[in-house]
Amino acid sequence: MFAIPFLDLPPLTKASGQIRLPGSKSISNRVLLLAGLAEGSTLVHDLLDSDDTRVMIEALRNLGCDLAHEGGALRITGIGGRLSVQQASLFLGNAGTAMRPLAAALAVLAATQGGQFELSGVARMHERPIGDLVDALRQLGCDIQYLGNDGYPPLRLAGQPQGQLATGAPVRVRGDVSSQFLTALLLALPLASSGQGEAPGTDIVIEVDGELISKPYVEITLNLLARFGITVQRDGWQRFTVPAGSRYRSPGAVHVEGDASSASYFVALGAIAAVDAPVLIEGVGSASIQGDVRFVEAAVAMGADVRMEANRIEVRRGAWPLRAITLDCNHIPDAAMTLAVMALYADGPTRLTNIASWRVKETDRIAAMAIELRKVGAQVEEGADFIEVRPPQAWQPAAIHTYDDHRMAMCLSLAAFNGVPVRILDPQCVGKTFPDYFEALFQLAHTHHDLVPVITIDGPTASGKGTLASTLAASLGYHFLDSGSLYRVAALASLRQGVADTDGPGIAALISKLRLRFDGPRLFLDGEEVSDQLRREDVGSRASKISALGDVRAALYALQVSFRRPPGLVADGRDMGTVIFPDAALKVFLTASPATRAERRHKQLISKGISSNIDDLRADLEARDARDRTRAIAPLQPAEDALLLDNSAQTVDESVAQVLGWWEQRTPFGI
Ligand SMILES: O=C(O)C1=C[C@@H](OP(=O)(O)O)[C@@H](O)[C@H](O)C1
Ligand SMILES: C=C(OP(=O)(O)O)C(=O)O
């Protein structure tokens, strides 16, 4: 996950490749709750691991459920409908799928078995309505108090042992603000219809007031209830009967499908940018129980070329520009946001209607979408329950606010296919449902080599360039290249494979297959950390030998250049700005006085338990500087357009701030 203040996306051009989706949020949280309420244990495979499921898991743990990892799956041993913990304060973040269903389940359990529970969330959760659900539960006799503003969390739920619920009359619930209120009742009321001890249960009828929105989510609820042994009878979308004697029965094991709302970003990616080869989305398809797979129909109407199998979607660009559409999006409230961004690439205005619920989700999504789409140049009209987007005539680079809304971040990333960069502020908000969204995007999205921004940090030995460069890379979410280590890694790999140190073509072939990854200053070769091995004496001397071979230098050039991938690169070395990335957007030549560098090296050696003489170190450094400056191939000298930074009197933080300041001046994002 990119836990940084902003992530700059370079202009992206094409997309292709395969992605496996994370598990469905809606299914994960329902299955977790049902498994937690059921008797016995349930092994859940492919569960979503994100903020929303973590708060649900933590809540279940606090309520006395046993949760244990088994391989990649989670085993949940439920409470069997009997409260084992009578008091708990549960923090539910901004997860509607945790807050609403847990409020209903715990209200019913407290009302019949006694107990006191407090449910709270982040500030925005305390602005998301829950009054219609509370009103419905109060009809049953549940004791629910608002601890903040009426109609909103936080809530206190209480009750006495052997309490009775008024289940004789139908429970009425409004359906036109959020379908999660009805879902919550459907998930919770089997706890009240089962009967206690010898007492027979009763049918419980729920009647929906007003037009139910987001209906496919209620289908998911009914489907999963059935898997846990409860068949709800229904009369259209108006009346639902939870049968007497209902008991949650664990199906033993459950597999969670990939998230269909998350799939929408990759369907859109394919429609916009899969020009040469398709985007393949694994984990969801025509067999899905999630209503958001119907996003595909809308994408096809806009021009996407889609082939759908039971559990997989293949997308290519079809019509281009995309076709503008007008669509009632009530059935796909979450995925519809993706259409608003596809609309940027359409041949006319796209109008999405019947989306009033957008206003009470993670943020007011109609307002937020209108503001941010205008920033990239679109003309946008918004109303109480619609949005209309006209594509930009001239695209503008924009710093996109994400309002702590995962979908704003994911959707707006798709605005980067227009020759201008896009800055996504607070990208870590994707953690709500898709922590590795941007990693997945960068796996599929490509761009021209020269559109990927590069910052080079060159400088003499012990100037601190490695620390500066890796810290900068981490701050910007960019890739990092410590070019100096590549000669050593080529030496190590060729030693391991038994390739002679005179066999230029052999070593070059090996270099082209190296699988390298930097994690800060640590280097991994084929998944194994080799940082320490690279400092071995035999590796060092082989490195200097093979670096004289023309084939090796050419292969290492190609390897270095291959690190230039979206979203960007910070490269440190001696010839990064002069030879390898002469078109880098920012070049820094880092120096420090020989005295300072000798002192740093001295401290470094002491910390490793190696004794040294500071004057000798200084003499060595000066001799090496002279050699480096005068060598024939790639001599160490600042690029003409490099900015010089002497960090003798600076802390690392100060030099990082200095370079980030220079970088900011070179980006088009004025914020
Ligand atoms: O029940 C569910 O899993 C959901 C229902 C929908 O909410 P509304 O019913 O409030 O539209 C949807 O937006 C949300 O992301 C998940
Ligand atoms: C509305 C959403 O979430 P929640 O489950 O919190 O309602 C969403 O994921 O878009």
Image: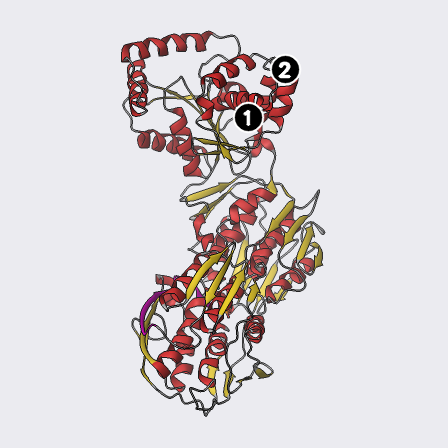
Secondary element under disc 1, as helix, strand or loop, is helix
Q: How far across and how far down the image is residue 281, in percent? A: 64, 52
- Which is more toward the observer, 142 or 263? 142
Q: How far across and how far down the image is residue 69, in percent? A: 47, 57
Residue topped by disc 2 = 503
Q: Residue furthest bottom?
A: 168
Mark 1 against mark 2, which lies toward the viewer? 2
Question: Can residue 363 be seen in this snapshot?
Answer: no
Number of callouts in the render? 2
Residue topped by disc 1 = 560
Q: How far across and how far down the image is residue 605, in percent? A: 32, 21
- Which is more toward the observer, 629 or 599? 599
Which part of the image, by quadrant, shows the C terminus?
A: top left
Confirm or deny contact between disc 1 and disc 2 (CB under 8 A): no
Amino acid type at mark 1: Gln
307 is within the stretch colored magenta: no
Region rendered in magenta = 85-97
Quarter-wise, where is residue 133 in the image?
bottom left
Q: Classify 378 as above or below 173.
A: above
